Amino acid sequence: MARTPMSLICAVCVAFASTMAQANPSPPSAQEQRDQLNRAQAEAAQHQLDENAANRRAYDAAVQARRDAIARDQAAYEAEKARLTREHDEAMARWQADVAACKAGHTEHCAPK
């Protein structure tokens, strides 16, 4: 069976169209485009939520570290204040004992003149 030039041209055109359809698929439909954009937006939103959560954890850790430092500093301050108060009270007690002894006539407890 011999092909005529026109039928041969049509066969080539059909084969070419089939090849082109496989090489260049049809553009996505509007729904497919929306779905693709929605997926991209959902991924970007999830990334932002993850980043926000990480930033919040870092902030909370920094706040807790600051509170811990304040508590340490306050405890050190209170300890130093208690030590100084104790030393002051001891010095005052010694001085009051020396004054009482001096007034009682024990001159070795009197302040030098």
Image (cartoon, helix red, strand yellow):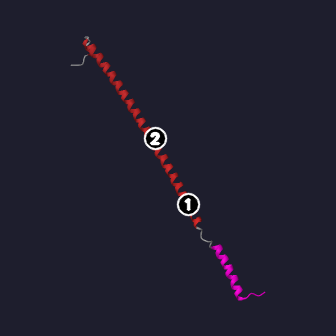
Q: Position of residue 101 (x, y in %)?
A: 28, 13
> What amino acid type is highlighted by mark number 2?
Gln
Q: Quadrant of the C terminus?
A: top left
Q: Say which of 82 and 56 sits in front.
A: 56
Q: Total marks drawn?
A: 2
Residue 36 placement: quadrant: bottom right
Q: Position of residue 96 (x, y in %)?
A: 29, 17
Q: Quadrant of the N terminus?
A: bottom right
Residue 95 counted in the magenta span: no
The residue shown at (42%, 35%) is: 71
Horizontal placement of 67 versus 47: left or right? left
Horizontal placement of 44 versus 92: left or right? right
Could you say which disc has been placed on residue 64 in the image? Answer: 2
Q: Say which of 94 and 19 sits in front.
A: 19
Q: Looking at this rendering, what residue extends furthest in the left direction?
A: 113
Mark 1 element type: helix
Q: Looking at this rendering, what residue extends furthest in the top direction?
A: 104
Mark 2 element type: helix
Within 10 Å of disc 2 (Cα), the crowding (few <14, some 14-19, many 20+) is few
The residue shown at (37%, 27%) is: 83
The residue shown at (27%, 14%) is: 100
Q: Position of residue 73 (x, y in %)?
A: 40, 35
The residues colored magenta run 1-23
Q: Is the residue 111 above or below the residue 43 in the image?
A: above
Q: Can you identify the residue that label 1 sits on?
A: 38
Nearest to N terminus: mark 2 or mark 1: 1
Q: Position of residue 66 (x, y in %)?
A: 43, 41
Within 10 Å of disc 1 (Cα), the crowding (few <14, some 14-19, many 20+) is few
